[in-house]
Image (cartoon, rainbow, N blue to C red):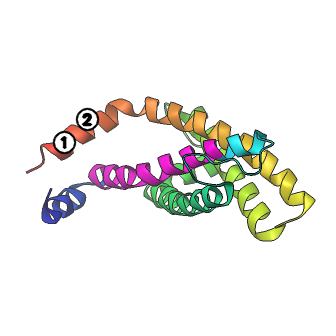
Amino acid sequence: MKIQKIKSFYLNSNANRNYLVELLAFIPFIAMIASGILMLIYHISENEKLLLFGINKSSWLLFHKITSCIALLMVIWHLIQHAYWIKNLITLQLKSKFKRINTTLFIVFTLAVLTAMCSWLVFSETTISDGLKGIHSKLGFLTIILFFIHIKNYFSWLKKMTLKFINFK
């Protein structure tokens, strides 16, 4: 697909912009989820020398941190595009079909980010960090479940926009 075609599609409407941002965000988010699941395997394993796909724990953790930072930036971009949703959430005027699940995902993801950042940047290498990592892994697992419900809820829109993108002239 030519860059000019993507640019034209992006500039064509807000829905198109949202779609392309979400498409772009999907890859690092899935990489973050996959590496997070692998980190859970390390978390429950007693074997410190365990290799998953030939990669050790510290390398998977670095990959998880990098993909998480990229995914976080994409989520922030996504939320900026939906700033009206945040405003309506804060002012208690949210009237969305998926209000409860989206609000829960927003809160759980925010807490997962905060526990990760605090364990990584504020309380690194302390017992508090270990506790935060435990909380983060549970919040991360819940985020994964909520994320897939979120995708399921908007699947028809994603399908429609994918067809529109493929057929865009």
Compared to 34, does 82 lie above or below?
Answer: below
Compared to 45, does 126 lie above or below?
Answer: below
In-image side of 30 versus 120 (left or right): left
In-image side of 159 versus 107 (left or right): left
Q: From the top left corner, tell me how far across and down residue 19 is, in percent.
A: 33, 49
> What residue do we see at 17% from left, 64% from top?
3
Per the rendering, the mark at residue 160 is 2
Compared to 169, does 164 lie above or below?
Answer: above
Residue 21: quarter of image: bottom left
Name the main secondary structure of what is drawn in magenta.
helix
Badges 2 and 1: C-beta atoms under 8 Å apart?
A: yes
Q: Amino acid at mark 1?
A: Lys
What stretch of residues is rendered in magenta? Answer: 15-38
Q: Residues within 10 Å of mark 2 (few under 14, many from 20)?
A: few
Q: Amino acid at mark 2?
A: Lys
Name the foreground residue: 33 vs 74.
33
Residue 130: quarter of image: bottom right
Q: From the top left corner, tell me how far across and down residue 7 is, in percent.
A: 20, 63
> What residue do we see at 27% from left, 51% from top?
16
> What residue do we see at 75% from left, 70% from top?
121
In-image side of 90 versus 17 (left or right): right
The residue beneath circle 1 is: 164
> Would residue 138 be seen by someone viewing this image from the given angle?
yes
